[in-house]
């Protein structure tokens, strides 16, 4: 082939290559993978890689100033014999259980009220989100001042009403500290339930309520047989998100109590931070963080199974 022929055929070859490349994009599977590539790269860099590093740390004796070596499940075994970790497990279940129940009850009640027609409805709906919009650390600092035994106005309110007030304040008394942090979590998390459930309520056709009323169903029966079944898929997802977020809560407890007093409010995140970052034992801190991973994984699988079951009905 002469030089002139090669020069003449080169643009044609490039055009053929470009055409074949665009032709591949015409296939739905190939195009789908191409469009997913940026998201997959982000997931690998910001989720998969840190998670893999965390798993490796949890199975090593790595410290802040040392690479460490592989020790298998030793960190997890040591945690099982730690009284502080045992208290942390109990605290996490108590904190998550009570906070989730109260957020669910209050959020559902607020959603039912906000779903009605009343003056300034849109303004009030927007105002409900304020506790959820304010940064967690900032709003928790306000509660830190409110619970302070010296600066708080609560003793002035409790004393005339003959309500006992802890001498060390709510955050300084192990018997009351957990209740205080649960209260703050409920205050902050209830708007998430309310707005999410309100969105679910607005997808329910009003004709169903009219038909139930014609059949003689009162408000309680309409809620039980119309509202609750149709709201269950949204309710299930909101509950799952709330349980995971509450189990992994860090800011509220860290700002209010730092796990005290006497480890009475330590959660997995605060204990992991104290052990790994403040104590320098990164391996054991990572083990604390990952200890509840199997439980949360089973919870997610159960939720997905239940949601698919509802969808197939």
Image (tube, rainbow, N blue to C red):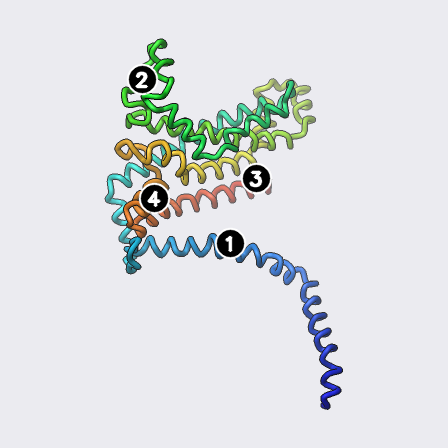
Other-residue count near label 1 (Cα within 10 Å), few / some / many at <14 / 14–19 / ≥20: few
The numbered mark, 2 or 4, whose residue comes first in the sequence reads 2
Q: Is label 2 in a helix, a strand or a loop?
A: loop
Other-residue count near label 3 (Cα within 10 Å), few / some / many at <14 / 14–19 / ≥20: few
Task: Answer left or right for 143 relative to 236.
Answer: left
Other-residue count near label 4 (Cα within 10 Å), few / some / many at <14 / 14–19 / ≥20: many
* Residue positioned 51% across, 54% down in the render: 43
What is the C-alpha distance between the residues marked 1 and 3?
29 Å
* Residue positioned 36% across, 46% down in the render: 289
What is the C-alpha distance between the residues marked 1 and 4?
24 Å
The numbered mark at residue 273 is 4
Other-residue count near label 2 (Cα within 10 Å), few / some / many at <14 / 14–19 / ≥20: some
The numbered mark at residue 165 is 2
> Which residue extends farthest front?
151
The numbered mark, 2 or 3, whose residue comes first in the sequence reads 2
The numbered mark at residue 269 is none
Q: Would you name the residue on which mark 3 appears?
A: 310
Q: Is label 3 in a helix, a strand or a loop?
A: helix
- Mark nearest the camera among 1 and 3 is 1
The numbered mark, 1 or 3, whose residue comes first in the sequence reads 1
Q: Is label 4 in a helix, a strand or a loop?
A: helix
Task: Answer left or right for 81 relative to 231.
Answer: left
The numbered mark, 1 or 4, whose residue comes first in the sequence reads 1
Q: Nearer the viewer, residue 151 or 98?
A: 151
Do the CB atoms of the residues marked 2 and 1 lie less than 8 Å apart? no
- Mark nearest the camera among 4 and 3 is 4
**The C terminus appears in which quarter of the rendering?**
top right
What is the C-alpha distance between the residues marked 2 and 3?
48 Å
Q: Would you name the residue on which mark 1 appears?
A: 43
């Amino acid at each position: 082939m002469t030089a002139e022929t090669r020069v003449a055929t080169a643009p044609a070859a490039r055009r053929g290559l470009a055409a074949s490349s665009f032709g591949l994009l015409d296939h739905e599977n190939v195009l789908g993978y191409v469009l997913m590539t940026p998201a997959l790269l982000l997931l690998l860099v910001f989720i998969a890689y840190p998670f893999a590093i965390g798993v490796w740390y949890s199975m090593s004796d790595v410290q802040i100033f040392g690479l460490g070596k592989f020790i298998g499940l030793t960190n997890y075994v040591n945690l099982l014999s730690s009284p502080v970790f045992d208290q942390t497990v109990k605290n996490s279940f108590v904190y998550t259980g009570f906070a989730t129940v109260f957020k669910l009850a209050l959020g559902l009640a607020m959603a039912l009220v906000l779903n009605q027609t009343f003056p300034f409805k849109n303004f009030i709906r927007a105002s409900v989100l304020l506790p959820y919009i304010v940064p967690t650390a900032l709003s928790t600092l306000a509660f830190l001042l409110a619970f302070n035994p010296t600066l708080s106005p609560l003793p002035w309110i409790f004393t005339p009403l003959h309500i006992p007030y802890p001498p060390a304040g709510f955050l300084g008394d192990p018997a009351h500290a957990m209740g205080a942090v649960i209260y703050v979590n409920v205050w902050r998390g209830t708007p998430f339930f309310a707005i999410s459930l309100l969105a679910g309520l607005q997808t329910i056709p009003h004709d169903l309520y009219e038909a139930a009323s014609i059949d003689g169903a009162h408000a309680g029966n309409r809620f039980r047989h119309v509202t609750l079944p149709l709201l269950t898929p949204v309710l299930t997802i909101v509950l799952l998100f709330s349980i995971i977020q509450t189990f992994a809560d860090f800011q509220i407890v860290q700002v209010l109590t730092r796990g005290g007093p006497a480890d009475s409010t330590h959660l997995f995140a605060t204990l992991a931070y104290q052990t790994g970052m403040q104590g320098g034992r990164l391996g054991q801190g990572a083990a604390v963080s990952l200890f509840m991973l199997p439980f949360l994984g089973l919870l997610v699988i159960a939720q997905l199974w239940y949601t698919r079951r509802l969808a197939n009905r």
